[in-house]
Amino acid sequence: TVVAKSISSDGTEGFSETVEIVMADYALPVMYENGMLLQRNKPVRIAGQANDGAEITVSVGGKTGKATADQGTFEIILEPLNASKNTDFTITDGTTVTSYNASIGELILCNGQSNMAYHMFQFPSLQGLLDKDYEDIHLFKQDSLTSNTPQTDIPSGRWVNASQKEVMYFSAF
């Protein structure tokens, strides 16, 4: 419960309102957000954090999986999904429902060092690829990060589509 108060510029208190805030019992890493791409024709692992005992249900592409959170985490393995665009990805703890837009297709993971930082616009021979949108191509962009321990999330990450605005910043490799 939160009490919201308005205070005028002269410091006098105005209205006061009590607000009940309901938080979800779960949290997903940012790679499971709007615009995500999930691998087709392979089992799909969905993992996140949740309050112990929370009953988590995930539905996507006609497949549904359930798990009970234990020691602050949950994991759901969905059966292989068929390729599709603009698919609903829904997660619920029975109270709070969160829905995202997902695509299911070929997921290719690339990594490297400084060579991955070269952008498309830096290569004159690739300029012809920058004049149109590629709505079926998704990129998970993240800032460089270093850690000596395994991480459960990439806070700076986000999914972007290969629009004219974004594709010029995609890795050229």
Image (cartoon, rainbow, N blue to C red):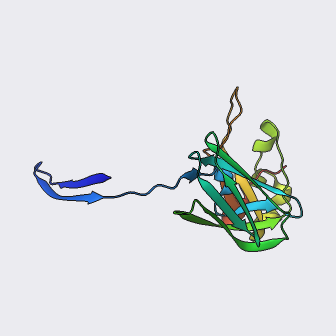
Q: Residue 120: x and y, percent?
A: 78, 54
Q: Residue 93: x and y, percent?
A: 58, 59
**Horizontally, is 38 left or right of 54 in the view?**
right
**Horizontally, is 52 left or right of 141 in the view?**
left
Q: Residue 90: x and y, percent?
A: 64, 66
Q: Is residue 12 visible?
A: yes
Residue 149 figure quarter: top right
Q: Nearer the viewer, residue 102 or 23?
A: 23
Residue extending farthest front: 53
Q: Nearer the viewer, residue 110 or 130?
A: 110
Q: Residue 79: x and y, percent?
A: 83, 62
**Horizontally, is 51 left or right of 23 in the view?**
right
Q: Report the residue at 71% width, 73% height from top.
A: 86
Q: Report the residue at 82% width, 42% height from top.
A: 111
Residue extending farthest right: 41
Vertical relation: 25 (above or below) 58:
above
Q: Nearer the viewer, residue 41 or 97?
A: 97
Q: Report the residue at 77% width, 45% height from top.
A: 118
Q: Report the residue at 85% width, 49% height from top.
A: 173
Q: Nearer the viewer, residue 168 or 6?
A: 6
The tally of labels here is 0
Q: Is residue 163 visible?
A: no
